[in-house]
Amino acid sequence: MAPVQTPRRVRDLGVVVGTQPTGPLNAITDVPGVRVGQTTISTGDLHTGVTAIVPDGYADGLPAAVAVGNGYGKLVGSTQVDELGVIETPVLLTGTLSVFRVADALLTWLLDRDPRATSLNPVVGETNDGHLSDVRRRPITPEHVHAALDSASADRPAEGCVGAGTGTSALGFKAGIGTASRTAGRGTVGVLVQANFSGTLTVLGTPVPAAPLDADGNSCMIVVATDLPLDARQLGRVARRAVFAMGRVGSDFSPGSGDYAVAFGTHRPPAFADRELRPVFQATTESVEEALLNSLTMATTTVGYQGRTAQAVPHDLVRPR
């Protein structure tokens, strides 16, 4: 059995991704007005939860876009985001078979806050945590969803085996939730990921082979937030770069993978020239790469459903040689 290790972010292990500076928390909550709340279920055969990304001003519609790397998944609300270029609710993440219960509970939470609303488009994504959690039980209740929303704060979100990442694995190891940020010119790009995909872990270009997990689900949800005044078309370009960044940590983009990115802006755009997007793209790919690595190094070995185990990545394999 591997020795117990303290979860640490990759920067604390000496791994510095890219060249752009991070925000103060190196988290999605470095973007002003973005908060995150999480509910975790971790007991016996259940390892799952809810992660809520709550931006200020969502009720008035914020510019947004969705990028689909591989559409083998359930991203509730994505077609309306594509059509209108806005989100009008928080973005929630959970396990595959709970996604519809989470969407319904989110609607209840929103309707309670707006008695005049007659149409809302909840945005809820998922990855399959069925390797470590009994997904058929669909344990998420409205209380779990409302607790995640009500607890949302601007603090750095917890990472690893929490919220929607409680039962996920990636690249042969236990994974979960990860976050990171970069400053980009006059604004900030922040990212939160729910990592649950296959491939060979790669750290700063160096492969770190692992024994393959016999796990169901090979997917990733990426949420990108920025306070730069980008329109929906430009956010679509950002979202696509977010999915591309999965390849930097070794994703094999398997046929059974649901790889999605939701990108939104907290400021409605007056104008932002496409020629100014280069540092934004770099900030996005660097943030996604680091967030994915954090999702692994902050996770802990977990024994779950039917005694199945996902081992934490040994930090000595990640540290620079």
Image: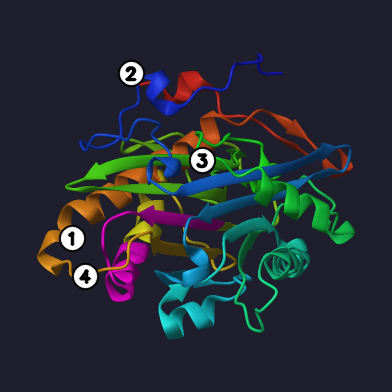
Amino acid type, label 1 = Leu
- In front: 315, or 275? 275
**Of the residues tagged 3 and 4, which is closer to the observer?**
4
Instruction: Report the Cα–Cα distance between label 1 and label 3.
Output: 24 Å
> What segment carries the magenta color?
220-240
Query: Residue 209 vs residue 41: left or right?
Result: left
**Of the residues tagged 1 and 4, which is closer to the observer?**
4
Instruction: Please report contact status of discs 1 and 4: CB closer than 8 Å, yes or no.
Output: no
- In front: 147, or 141? 147
Amino acid type, label 4 = Pro
Q: Is residue 154 above or below residue 52?
A: above
Amino acid type, label 3 = Gly
Instruction: Point out residue 214 in the picture as x, y percentages from the top left corner.
Output: 70, 49
Instruction: Point out residue 152 in the picture as x, y percentages from the top left corner.
Output: 60, 44
Residue located beneath label 3 in the image: 178
Residue located beneath label 4 in the image: 270
Instruction: Point out residue 278 in the picture as x, y percentages from the top left corner.
Output: 16, 57
Ranked by sequence position, the earlier of labels 2 and 1 is 1
Residue located beneath label 1 in the image: 277
Any part of residue 305 in sight: yes
Ranked by sequence position, the earlier of labels 1 and 3 is 3
Give SS at disc 3: strand
Instruction: Report the Cα–Cα distance between label 3 and label 2.
Output: 24 Å
Instruction: Report the Cα–Cα distance between label 3 and label 4.
Output: 31 Å
